[in-house]
Amino acid sequence: MAKIMASKLRDVELITDTGIRLGWVYDLSFDEETGDILVIVAEPDEDLDTSEFVTDHEGLLLIPISAVKSIGEVIIIDSGKLAVKSKLRRIGPIKKTEPQEEPGE
């Protein structure tokens, strides 16, 4: 696997595999303990409706690193792995259930 300097990723364009221009790399978020990259923080394209995307408090897109398909002159994002709010809503809250009693107890 080729190594890429994080500084070389700044301002690289992010495009989904379906051709949607997401924006440009602004920063990377790392796991402090392992050093693994968790999220690409991206400045959204001005024409992108960010209401369905996961964003931070500044409106920057949060793209999970697991969604990256390839890195070159642009970064291709797997649209099926892209974190969007509608996917998060479909999961819904986790309901706690009471344990079922066994027959005869």
Image: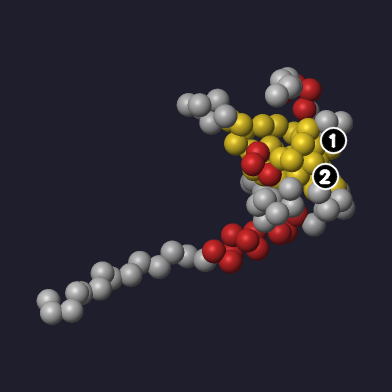
What residue is rendered at 12% in x and 76% in y?
105
Residue placed under numbered mark 2 in the picture: 15
In the picture, residue 65 is in which quadrant? top right
Q: Is residue 104 above or below residue 92?
A: below
Q: Amino acid at mark 2?
A: Ile
State the quadrant of the N terminus.
top right
What residue is rendered at 87% in x and 31% in y?
73
Residue 46, how many percent across, how many down?
86, 48
What residue is rendered at 53% in x and 31% in y?
31
For the residue carrying disc 1, how many other residues have a C-alpha within 10 Å: few (<14), some (14-19), or many (20+)? some
Residue 48, how many percent across, how many down?
83, 53
Structural distance between the alpha carbons of marks 2 and 1: 7 Å
Which of the two residues, 12 or 104, is positioned nearer the viewer here?
A: 104
Residue placed under numbered mark 1 in the picture: 74
In the picture, residue 87 is in which quadrant? bottom right
For the residue carrying disc 2, how many other residues have a C-alpha within 10 Å: few (<14), some (14-19), or many (20+)? some
Please state if 29 lies on the left or on the right of 19 as rendered. Answer: left
Question: Most extreme residue toward the left, as rendered?
Answer: 105
**Callouts 2 and 1 close, C-beta under 8 Å:** yes
Which mark, residue 84?
Answer: none
Which of the two residues, 59 or 73, is positioned nearer the viewer here?
A: 73
Q: Secondary structure at mark 2?
A: strand
In the picture, residue 7 is in which quadrant? top right
Residue 48 visible, this angle: yes
Q: Amino acid at mark 1?
A: Val
Q: Is residue 92 above or below residue 25?
A: below
Of the residues under marks 2 and 1, which one precedes in the sequence?
Answer: 2
Residue 24, how many percent across, how many down?
81, 38
Residue 88, how many percent across, how many down?
59, 60
